[in-house]
Amino acid sequence: MLENPRVWRGRSQAQRKAGLASGYPELDRHLPGGGWPAEALTEILTEQYGIGELRLLMPALARLSAEDAQSDHGEPGWIAWVAPPFQPYPPALQQCGIDLSRMLIVRPKNASEVLWSAEQALSSGTCAAVLFWTEELDDQTSRRLQLAAEKGHSWAIAFRPMLARQQPSAAALRLELHSSEQGTRVHILKSRGGRPTVLNNLL
Amino acid sequence: MSRAWKSPVTAREAAPTSSAAQQALPFLEPAPLVQTLSLTPTSVRRLWFCIWLPGLSLEASRSSDGATAIVEEQQGIHRVLLADAQAEAAGVMAGQSANAALALLPTLQLEERSPLREQQVLEGLATWLERFSSFVCIADRDVLLLEIAGSVRLFGGIRPLREKISTSLCQHGFAASLAIAPTPLGATWLARAGRRVCIRDEQNLRRTLRDLPLASLNWPEGLCASLTGMGVISIGDCLRLPREGFVRRFGTEHMLELDRALGHLPDPRSSWRAPERFCADYEMTEEQSDRELLLNICRELLLSHEQFLLLRQLGAQRLSFSFFHLKSSATELRLGCARADRSAERWLALLRIRFEQLVLPEPVIAIRLRSGMTQALQAESERLSFHTASNRPARRYSIAQLAERLIARIGEQSVHSMTLVAEHRPHYAWRAQSLLSDWTSNTLSEVRRHLQRPLWMLPEPALLPADSGYPLHQGSRLQLLHGPERLETGWWDEDGISRDYYTAVNPAGIRLWIFRNRSRTSSWYLHGYFG
């Protein structure tokens, strides 16, 4: 029972399920398990896209896409991008160390297809990470996606507008990103097994 | 001609009805002819299985209940060609005029003979028979021939093979007369005579054929009548006639036919090949709009498609369904698959996803399933289970299957992978790659580390407003951090560029990738975000 991340055990970091190292030591220190919650839903709220939300994820995604074949019986995981607001630019992705042959871009036509595609990709067991951009994600749907991520052993990342801040969510981790002249501020709104904090000038 | 006898294979392929053979043979005495031909290597033994379907025109007809008779127009009068058991019991016979038959049995259903439908049924049977032999031949409008010498061992002997075929034919409602003989014509005549025999050697065949009545030869009626008038009533009688005289009176053709049947002359046949592409229709008796029912019909079609491909060891990568309506034009539905597949269940799963979204303007009257290009199916071995002993459990389905499902619902254009292209122009430096084709090809192109490239690219460069030459973004001036990087290339095609790229940052801290055209110095464009 103590291994269950839902059980809050004060500040002790012992015996946590290991997370995906984010590549930002300061962030890792504040996340339970020392990194992004694997096999769970992460929500990232931003005022607008392009303020550094991808840079935040790149080190972890690069590690996932290039992961050693042995860890996953012969096939490293794919990274699915569902309904990205702009075109993810392959040369830049490659510069970040991402294996381009493992990218799956899905551009659904409407909001319900976004959620359907994300759920399909999460539960298929072939995608190591599924990034999706949506404005409509209610409590029930986020729970579904959380379950799909657990089932498919996949990391789900939902990008949502700041308006969604007041809505309840089943996500294991909720972050808020603010950009300013000094840098991007990361605000941990909710962290299962951790506690909310504000990290300045992370990026 | 001498070349044709060299090997049994070439002998089979050579046409025996060449003019030289026709001219030369009648003047040969029978004995020397047999001697010359006995030099032919006989290592390849053939055994022909003949299926004669005397009631094919009735079986191919569609009416199911009640007394039925098939009529055909002969010299302006509709005459009964075939009548089913019920009609025969009432006295309807072949050769009667349609009116006479109706007088005998007023409830009789008359149906015009349809050679096209008979041919379709026959081709369907030939396709089905391909599972018993690699050589199936449609010999006549109601005769099918199978070469079974190579199949006997596989099916555990001639008798089990014959039983298997005859019971299956019975189950499908075909009345067939079967015979096995070393020559195709011999087998056909035996089947037509209703002799359910199995003859393996030619000696025996000649003995048996001698007793056959002339009627089983399917020769023209006039010829049969004149032969019968001469007291010739069996094949044996025919053979007893002098060859020369027979040829002079009745023509070369019939003599050659006798020689072929007895095995004195080779009788090459061409094998019937089923089409490599699948196309099947399902016609409904009335219009249907019940989706579950339509899906069930599609399932039936997919199952027969699977059978079709299974027999050929093929798989299909694309399928198309056509839903026909009475008034409007047909609704098309295309399905694609990442790897060639034949499994009906897998196709059905894809169909279900698409079918949910399909808008049918009207009820459906018929459904057609057509397969695209077929290809040899690659068998794949499963992994041994101890390889999956790592912490990850077995995946639910592969990336190919995931892509198929996504494509089935969202469309092929909207699901893709990406690859780099060695090109300086930023918007040509990559391209989308379809997941339905082979995507394993890895790109060799490498982007230089020191070049600043944004993670987010705008689909089209956006014009930025400018304030006395400085670009503005969201109302405030941009600060240039890095640059310029001059890209001046592409002069060889329509889409040449000449740009200076800069990395800029706006007061909110967002980093942008902007450029200015060299030719028009005043305009700034936003091309991407560093994300």
Image: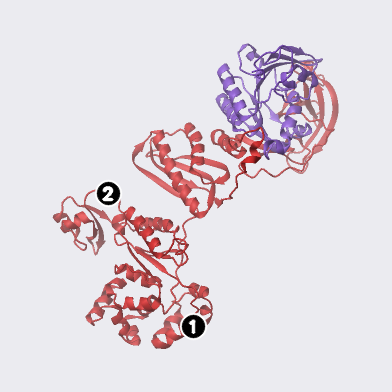
User: x, y percentage for residue A133?
Assistant: 64, 24
| Chain letter for the purple colouring in the rendering | A
Query: Which corner quadrant of the image does residue A14 belong to?
Result: top right
Q: Nearer the viewer, residue B33 or A13?
A: A13
Q: Which mark is residue B39?
A: 1
Q: Are marks 2 and 1 in contact (CB under 8 Å)?
A: no
| Residue indicated by mark 2 | B64
Q: Can residue B119 be seen at all in this image of the molecule?
A: yes
The amino acid beneath tag 1 is Leu
Query: Relative to A44, does residue B274 appear above or below in the rendering?
Result: below
Number of numbered tags placed on the structure image: 2
Question: Is B263 displayed left or right of B190 in the figure?
Answer: right
- Using a 10 Å C-alpha cutoff, classify the residue at mark 2 as few (fewer than 14 neighbours), some (14 to 19) or many (20 or more): few
The amino acid beneath tag 2 is Ser
Query: Relative to B494, does residue A32 appear above or below in the rendering?
Result: above
Question: Dot 1 lies on which element?
Answer: loop
Question: Dot 2 lies on which element?
Answer: loop
